Amino acid sequence: MKNNIFTVMKKELLRFFGDRRMLLAIFLPGVLIYLIYTLMGDAMMSGLMPDEETSYTVQIEELPESVEMLLTASSGGFSYVTVEDPMTAVANQELDLYVVFPADFDAKVAALEVPGVELYYHSASMTSSTAYSLFTSLLDGYESMLANRFDVNADLGKTYDLASAEDTTGMLFSMLMPMLLIMLMFSGCMAVAPESIAGEKERGTIATLLVTPIRRSELAIGKIAALSIISLLSGLCSFFGVLFALPNLMGGEMDGMIDANIYGMSDYAWILGVILTTILVFVSLISILSALAASVKEASSMISPLMILVTLVGLSGMFGTATSTWVYFIPVYNSVQCISGIFSLAYQPAHIVITMVVNCVVAGIFVFVLTKLFNSERVMFKK
């Protein structure tokens, strides 16, 4: 029996690994995810977080002494110029900001009047918008100082945010990774399983396998085992692509607060176990649908609605980790909860063991159903 299963597995693995297009389908998504997420992070940070050395050209009319002192003390990077027509210069993006203070600004402020300050900028220009935001923030801070009665977190030498890098990383990864991993795993299974069964039915090669002296259960186990290995490689490649790219995507905003090194080998071992058993469920379920279909196209149309359901289940990881034990008896949902718990470092090994056992049992039931379908000539020779 083992020899027959290994023979089927070898046939499937050689077919996939001997096809360059299939190899690209397995490994290319992970590489693309890493490159895209990294480029997105660089683009967002370069656009939303300007270089500290950026200089903003500003023209100021009637600059009061009090504000001049604040500008001197600040590190806004303003470069002061004078042009003949500042309004036109701003409109033509030749000047980043034009500020007009009323005459006797300081005297009016001292007299408790409310003098108006006019700031002209170009919202379609990133540098102009940034200069406007920086100058507005400076004026807002100055306004709050005028009626200051108490300070909040005034000591710049103290750290008031007590969240550690471990806490921040756990929160971020536990919210994003469950959905991403579930979607990547299902996509990997969806990419290889229909071709293995529905594709062979469509080409007529499945008939050759069915007439060989091999049990249908051995054929089902061999195919699912081989497809699981291929899907696991695809899922792991995409997983590591996301894992390595996520700090690049968020690093500009949360520099120093994301550290994937907080996870140990035991955490990754638990994740691998959950991923493998979840892939078994996905592969066996998709194999059943592929066996019921007459072509790859029909199988894909039958599987596509499941992607929506799987995505919704994956989103549940954003709402925290369940503590009730019975939740971990629900296939797929239990995997999402386990992944969320592992990345948040707030998991119970018993729940993960229950999840893996339940997934294996469900996959076994699906293998039994697939065996019955292989025994049905009406299903296997469906046109």
Image (cartoon, grey):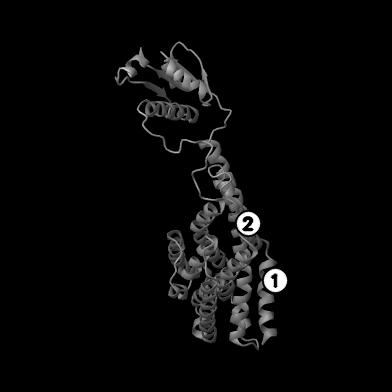
Side of 232 where 368 appears, left or right: left
Badge 1 is on which residue?
14
Image x and y of residue 109, in percent: 34, 19
Q: Are marks 1 and 2 in contact (CB under 8 Å)?
A: no
Q: Amino acid at mark 1?
A: Leu
Image x and y of residue 283, in percent: 55, 72
Return the residue nearer the eye: 149 or 233. 149
**Residue at 58% of width from left, 41% of height from top?**
42
Q: Quarter of the image containing the N terminus?
A: bottom right
Image x and y of residue 277, in percent: 56, 73
Element marked by disc 2:
helix
Front of the two marks 1 and 2: 2
Return the residue nearer the eye: 207 or 150. 150
Image x and y of residue 359, in percent: 52, 76
Query: Can residue 6 be seen at all in this image of the molecule?
Result: yes
N-term mark: 1 or 2: 1
Return the residue nearer the eye: 72 or 203. 72
Q: CA distance from mark 1 to mark 2?
A: 19 Å
**Residue at 41% of width from left, 19% of height from top?**
99
Element marked by disc 1:
helix
Badge 2 is on which residue?
28
Query: Can residue 231 be seen at all in this image of the molecule?
Result: no
Side of 144 where 267 appears, left or right: right
Return the residue nearer the eye: 375 or 245. 245
Side of 138 where 257 appears, left or right: right
